[in-house]
Image (cartoon, grey):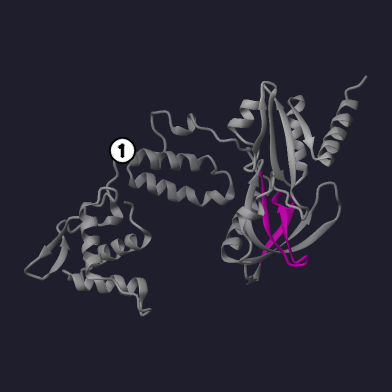
């Protein structure tokens, strides 16, 4: 069975104790005390001798861990030691599958190297590949030649990602100027950033707008003069990412209640909708030779209207009437542009 996080921490502590040149040959009690002190301090939690016995056995023998640590017991010194003095679980040998997996992950991340937020990983990846004795460029076809992600060549506003990521991670307040499309008005925003989210090659930040005392979403490509304010904020513990976007198609979240949207797809589109639902709430309402009817529970937003328009004549809106009228109006206006 995979080790839990506390077991993994104990393995690290035991490894450190066995490599401590100042206190060689630690006894089982020494190892137990070291683990107990590091994990629990004086909080009253205790680690038993049997736990340490199991940890030593796992480090020696557990195949899923892959340590196979050369731990020996010295009768002369009454303590444990590594038979190989250079051994440590922090520098484990990797098999071919491990190397290929890490190389694939590194090369995948390289595809995003032009985004400022990910530039910080370039050096780290190079160090990993060098440590593994793998060249970033070789004579063989690399994985990114046969694996390509859907992404834009340039993300406008991506220069703000690093600052916003750090601010959200460390609960720091930010300020920026914000100008909506097709508007000359520039707003000064003070925001407690909670989350960064990408949608259709645009980055957004969701956070608590201090002037509105409400959660708001801002697009990075409409920002300017972003700066950190030298104070922190207390995150609203009630905020939950999954719940916040539960009824969303895209990025827009409104104060409206979600609607049950019923859509009928023809027989050509039906297999695609069944194999890749358009929303996690999707349910099959009807299924016959003429296609399928699905029902989703979502907010009626511009993203939903745009998605439905993209299906063209392969979909029909059955409910609600409000959405049906919105799409009908958009289709009529589009048709007028092509009438001679």
Residue appearing at x 25%, y 57% in the figure: 88
* Quarter of the view holding residue 172: bottom right
x then y, percent, for residue 90 = 30, 56
Asked if residue 235 is positioned above or below residue 156 in the image, the reply reads below
Residue at the location (36% across, 80% down)?
42
Q: Quadrant of the C terminus?
A: top right
Seen as rendered, the residue at the extreme right is 340
Residue 205 at x, y percent in the picture? 67, 55
165, 233: nearer the viewer: 233
Dominant secondary structure (helix, strand or loop) of the stretch shown in magenta:
strand
Assess whether residue 226 is covered by the magenta stretch.
yes
- Residue 310 visible in this rendered orientation of the protein: yes
Res 72 quadrant in image: bottom left
Q: Dot 1 surroundings within 10 Å: few (below 14), some, or many (20 or more)? A: few
Q: Secondary structure at mark 1?
A: helix
- Any magenta on residue 207? yes
**In front here: 226 or 2?**
2
Question: Is residue 139 placed above or below 247 in the rendered structure?
Answer: above
Q: Which residues are magenta?
A: 202-228
Q: Which residue is mark 1?
A: 96
Residue 302 located left or right of residue 159:
right
Q: Position of residue 228 (x, y in %)?
A: 65, 65
Q: Residue furthest left?
A: 76
Q: Nearer the viewer, residue 330 or 1?
A: 1
The mark tally for this picture is: 1
Q: Is residue 87 visible?
A: no
Q: Residue at x 39, y 32 (%)?
A: 138
Q: Quadrant of residue 34?
A: bottom left
Taking the image as shown, residue 48 lies to the left or right of residue 292, namely left
Q: Position of residue 58 (x, y in %)?
A: 24, 56
* Residue nearer the viewer, 78 or 227: 78
């Amino acid at each position: 069975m995979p080790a839990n996080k506390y077991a993994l921490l104990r393995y690290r502590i035991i490894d450190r104790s066995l490599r401590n040149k100042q206190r060689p040959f630690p006894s089982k009690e020494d190892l137990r005390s070291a683990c107990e002190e590091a994990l629990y301090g004086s909080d009253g939690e205790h680690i038993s001798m049997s736990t340490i016995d199991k940890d030593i056995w796992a480090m020696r023998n557990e195949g899923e861990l892959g340590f196979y640590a050369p731990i020996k017991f010295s009768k002369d010194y009454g303590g444990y030691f590594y038979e190989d003095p250079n051994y440590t679980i922090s520098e484990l040998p990797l098999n071919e599958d491990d190397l290929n997996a890490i190389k694939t992950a590194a090369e995948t991340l390289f595809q995003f190297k032009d985004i400022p937020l990910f530039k910080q990983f370039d050096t780290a990846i190079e160090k990993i590949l060098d440590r593994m004795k793998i060249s970033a460029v070789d004579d063989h076809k690399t994985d990114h030649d046969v694996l390509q992600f859907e992404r834009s060549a340039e993300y406008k506003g991506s220069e703000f990602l690093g600052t916003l990521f750090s601010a959200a991670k460390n609960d720091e307040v930010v300020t920026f100027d914000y100008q909506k499309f097709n508007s000359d008005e520039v707003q000064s925003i003070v925001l407690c950033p909670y989350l960064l989210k990408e949608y259709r090659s645009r980055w957004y930040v969701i956070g608590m707008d201090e002037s509105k005392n409400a959660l708001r979403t801002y697009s990075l490509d409409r920002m300017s003069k972003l700066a950190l304010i030298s104070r922190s904020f207390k995150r609203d513990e009630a905020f939950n990412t999954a719940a916040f976007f539960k009824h969303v198609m895209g990025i827009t979240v409104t104060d409206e209640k979600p609607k049950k949207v019923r859509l009928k797809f023809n027989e050509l589109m039906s297999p695609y909708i069944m194999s890749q639902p358009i929303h996690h709430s999707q349910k099959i309402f009807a299924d016959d030779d003429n296609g399928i009817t699905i029902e989703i529970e979502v907010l009626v937003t511009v993203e939903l209207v745009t998605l439905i328009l993209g299906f063209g004549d392969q979909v029909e809106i059955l409910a609600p009437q409000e959405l049906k009228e919105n799409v009908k109006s958009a289709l009529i206006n589009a048709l007028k542009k092509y009438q001679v």
